[in-house]
């Protein structure tokens, strides 16, 4: 089902000429991150102001989230990124900036 969601997201980003717009919106990324956080932290209903540490996050959970985000979006996210940007909306902002600038692609 996750693959289907990714395909739908890419289809939604096609413009009238059929070209794909690879820019990612804050809302799309934030929603996807909320799902990942929810799965790893086993907490439901994660909103934009959710704080990773207040939800029970620790270093192991941070590594799991960084790994899942890197895999899902094809971009390198470090554990440190989550420690520095531990509120969901801030973490999403960093990810969106990297995706839109094509920064730190995995090797």
Image: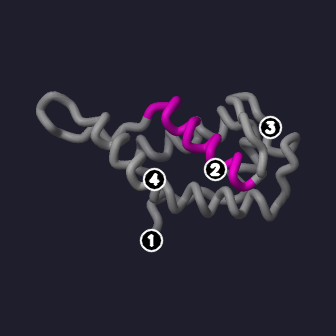
Q: Give the Cα separation between the discs numbered 4 and 1.
A: 27 Å
Residue at the spot of label 4: 1
Classify 106 as above or below 14: below
Q: First in sequence, mark 3 or 4: give its number.
A: 4
Name the element at disc 3.
loop
Residue at the spot of label 3: 51
Residue 105 picture location, percent across and down: 44, 60
Is 103 on the left or on the right of 16, as rendered?
Answer: right
Q: First in sequence, mark 2 or 1: give its number.
A: 2
Residue at the spot of label 1: 107
Nearest to the eye among marks 3 and 2: give it.
2
Start-end of magenta stretch: 25-40
Q: Residue placed at 45% from the left, 59% from the top? A: 74
Q: Is residue 32 magenta?
A: yes
Q: First in sequence, mark 3 or 2: give its number.
A: 2
Q: Give the Cα separation between the discs numbered 3 and 4.
A: 27 Å
Residue 36 picture location, percent across and down: 63, 50
Nearest to the eye among marks 3 and 1: give it.
3
Nearest to the eye among marks 4 and 1: give it.
4
Q: Residue placed at 41% from the left, 44% from the top? A: 101
Q: Give the Cα separation between the discs numbered 3 and 2.
A: 14 Å
Residue at the spot of label 2: 36
Q: Give the Cα separation between the discs numbered 4 and 2.
A: 14 Å
Q: Residue placed at 28% from the left, 40% from the top? A: 11
In the picture, which quadrant includes the C terminus? Answer: bottom left
Name the element at disc 2.
helix
Name the element at disc 4.
loop
């Amino acid at each position: 089902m996750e693959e289907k969601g990714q395909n739908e997201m890419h289809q939604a980003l096609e413009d009238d000429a059929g070209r794909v717009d690879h820019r990612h919106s804050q809302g799309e990324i934030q929603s996807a991150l909320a799902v990942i956080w929810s799965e790893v932290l086993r907490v439901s209903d994660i909103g934009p102001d959710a704080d990773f540490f207040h939800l029970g996050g620790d270093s192991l959970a941070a590594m799991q989230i960084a790994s899942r985000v890197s895999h899902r979006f094809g971009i390198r996210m470090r554990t440190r990124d989550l420690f520095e940007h531990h509120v969901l909306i801030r973490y999403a902002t960093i990810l969106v900036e990297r995706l839109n600038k094509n920064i730190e692609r995995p090797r």
